[in-house]
Amino acid sequence: MKKIKITLHKDGTQKIEVLGAVGEECLAFTQELEKRLGSPIGDRVLKDEFYETEIEREHDYEVAR
């Protein structure tokens, strides 16, 4: 299940983190939210999951059992 974790800092900046997504689906998942926030996107930090594919994720899960 995909989730969004939002952290609002005292200086007005935000951190948006996607949990449970792989590849570019994390960018698509936050696109509407980023548009509604209206502020320019700051530094985008891509997690390791961004470079995974769904097949790799399923395979890792199968091995971990």
Image (cartoon, rainbow, N blue to C red):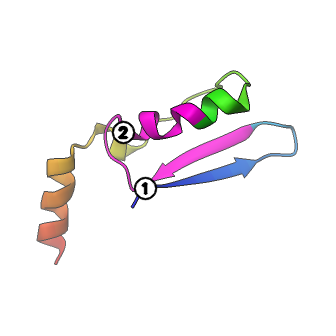
Amino acid type for the residue under numbered disc 1: Lys
**Total labels drawn:** 2
Is 41 part of what is drawn in magenta?
A: no
Q: Locate residue 26: give its quadrant.
A: top left
Residue at 45% from the left image edge and 34% from the top image edge: 27
Q: Which residues are magenta?
A: 14-32
Percent x, y for residue 4? 55, 52
In terms of depth relative to the viewer, which is nearer, 21 or 50?
21
Q: Quadrant of residue 33?
A: top right
Q: Is residue 39 left or right of residue 54?
A: right
47 or 29, nearer to the observer: 29
Q: CA distance from mark 1 to mark 2?
A: 10 Å
The mark found on residue 25 in the picture is: 2
Who's the residue at 68% across and 31% down the image? 36
Q: Secondary structure at mark 1?
A: loop
- Residue 62 location (% of width, % of height): 12, 69
Which of the 4 image quadrants contains residue 1?
Answer: bottom left
Q: Are marks 1 and 2 in contact (CB under 8 Å)?
A: yes
Q: Nearer the viewer, residue 38 or 62?
A: 38
Question: What is the quadrant of the C terminus in the image?
Answer: bottom left
**What kind of element bears circle 2?**
helix
Residue picked out by circle 1: 2
**Magenta stretch contains residue 22:** yes
Instruction: Report crowding for label 1: few under 14, some 14 to 19, many 20 or more residues within 10 A (C-alpha).
Output: few
Q: Residue at x 63, y 27 (%)?
A: 35
